[in-house]
Amino acid sequence: MQAEPAPKLLGKRIVLGVTGSIAAYKAAGLLRLLVREGAQVNVVLTDAATRFIAPLTFEVLSGRPVATDLFASHQEMLHLSLPEQADAVVVAPATAHFLAKAALGLADDLLSTMLLTTRCPLIIAPAMDGDMWAHPTVVSHVVQLRQRGALIVEPEEGPLASGRIGQGRLAQETTILAAIEAQLCRRGDWADERVLVSAGPTQEPIDPVRFISNRSSGKMGYAIAEAARERGAAVTLVTGPTWLPIPSGVDAVAVTTAEEMEKALLMRLPWATVVVMAAAVADFRPKHPAVHKLKKKSQAWKFLEFEPTRDILHLLSEHRTSQILVGFSAETRDLGAHAKEKLIRKRLDLIVANDVSAEGAGFGSDMNAATLIDRDHREIRLPLMPKRELAHHILDAIQRLRSHARQSGPQAN
C-alpha cells in the first residue's frame, strides 16, 4: 500500500483573518484544508465577519479560540503575539474596506492593528462585488500592498452575489492554499546553494567628478539576493553604486566600475553554484579619463573618446564549470528576439527578458514584468508584479533547471 504524502504545512503556524464579505463562509473550507495539511491556525474575525459566520464554526474546525476583540482582557496584546508567532498571515476573504485600511495603515480593530506588527509573509485574497475590484482606488491600494511585499491572490471571474458576472469571486480555497504553500514550503529549499548576484549600475569616470552610467537602481538584483537568502542560500552580492540598504545576512562587495565588477565576480565564480547577472554594466567607458576636472570650455570635450568594456557575462560563461548562469535582457523593442539571441550567444541557462519602457516596470520601479526563457527555449511570461515576487519566480525557474539537470545527468555547458 502506498504511503500517504506528509502534510505540507506540518508545524506551520498561520493566522487566518476573515473580513465581512458574503464569501466569509468559504474561509471555513480554507481552514479545513490548512488543518488537514498540518497547520496550526489561529482565526481572527472582524466584527463584520461575525455577521456572516459565527466564531464557533472556526473554533470547532481549528480547535483553538477565535479572536475578535482588540480590547478583550483575556486576549491582551494579541495584535503583537499572534503575528510574532506566525509563519504567515492570511486574510481571506478581504473586502475593499479592509484593503484600504491595510494600504493606509489604519488600525481600528484587531486584524488591522495586527498587520502593523506583521513581519512574516502576508497573503491576501480579496472578494468583492460589481466593479469594485477595478475601481481606481482599490487598484491603487492593491498596488501599494504589493509594493510592500504582500502576496495578492486575485479574485476570480464568475457569478457574483449581486447576480452580475465579473471579477470579484474569492479565489478557490485550493488556489489560496497553493499560494500559502508556495510561500512557506520553499523556505530553506536553497540551503545547499551558493548564489553570486550582481546588481546596480557601473560608473565609468570621465574625470574625477564626472562619470557616465545608466538608470539601473539595483532593485531587481537586491530582490534576488534577498529572496535567495530567505530560502536558505549563502549569498554574495556584488553591487554597483546604489542607495539601497544591503539585505541582512548577505555578504556584499561594493564596486564602482565595470572593471572592478568583472574582477569581483571572476574571483568569486569558483565558490558559486548559481550566478545571477542582474547588474546593468556600462557598455562603453571613456578611453582616457582626465586626471583633473575638465573645465567647461576645455577642448577635451570635443575629442572625448570611448572604448567598449569587456562583456562580463560572456567571461563568466567562458570560465564557469558547473554553475547555473542567469542573464538579463533589458530591451525597449523586439524583446523576445534579442533575449533569445543573447541566451544562445552567451550560452546561458536562463535569461530574464523585460521591457524597460513598459508602464509601471523597469528601472527605478518596485514592480516588473518579465519573460523567462531557459536553455531549452521554454518560456514563462510573468505579468507585472513586485520585484521581490518576481525574484522568487526566477529562483523557482533556476530550481527546475537544477532538478532537470540532476535527472538527465551531466551535460556540457
Image (spheres, helix red, strand yellow):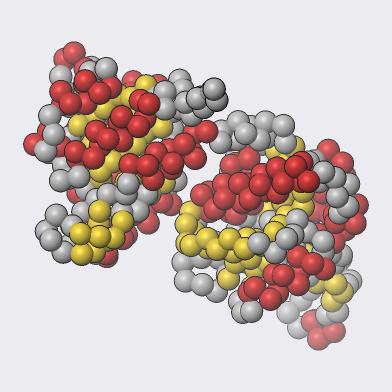
Which is more toward the observer, 45 or 53?
Answer: 53
Task: Judge left or right: residue 239 versus residue 60.
Answer: right
Is 16 above or below relative to 211? Answer: above
Which residue is pictured at 31% across the width and 29% down the height?
32
* Residue 373 appears in the rendering: yes
Residue 116: x and y in percent read: 33, 35
Residue 17 location (% of width, % of height): 27, 34
Quadrant holding the C terminus: bottom right
Query: Where on the picture, by quarter, is residue 142?
Result: bottom left
Q: Nearer the viewer, residue 18 or 136?
A: 18
Task: Identify which residue is drawn at 24% across, 33% down.
Answer: 28
Q: Is residue 55 left or right of residue 200?
A: left
In the image, residue 407 above or below residue 277: above
- The quarter holding residue 318 reads bottom right
Picture residue at 48% right of the left edge, 29% below the top? 8
- Asked whether 315 or 123 is in front, the reply is 123
Residue farthest toward the top in the current orientation of the protein: 74
Residue 162 appears left or right of 165? left
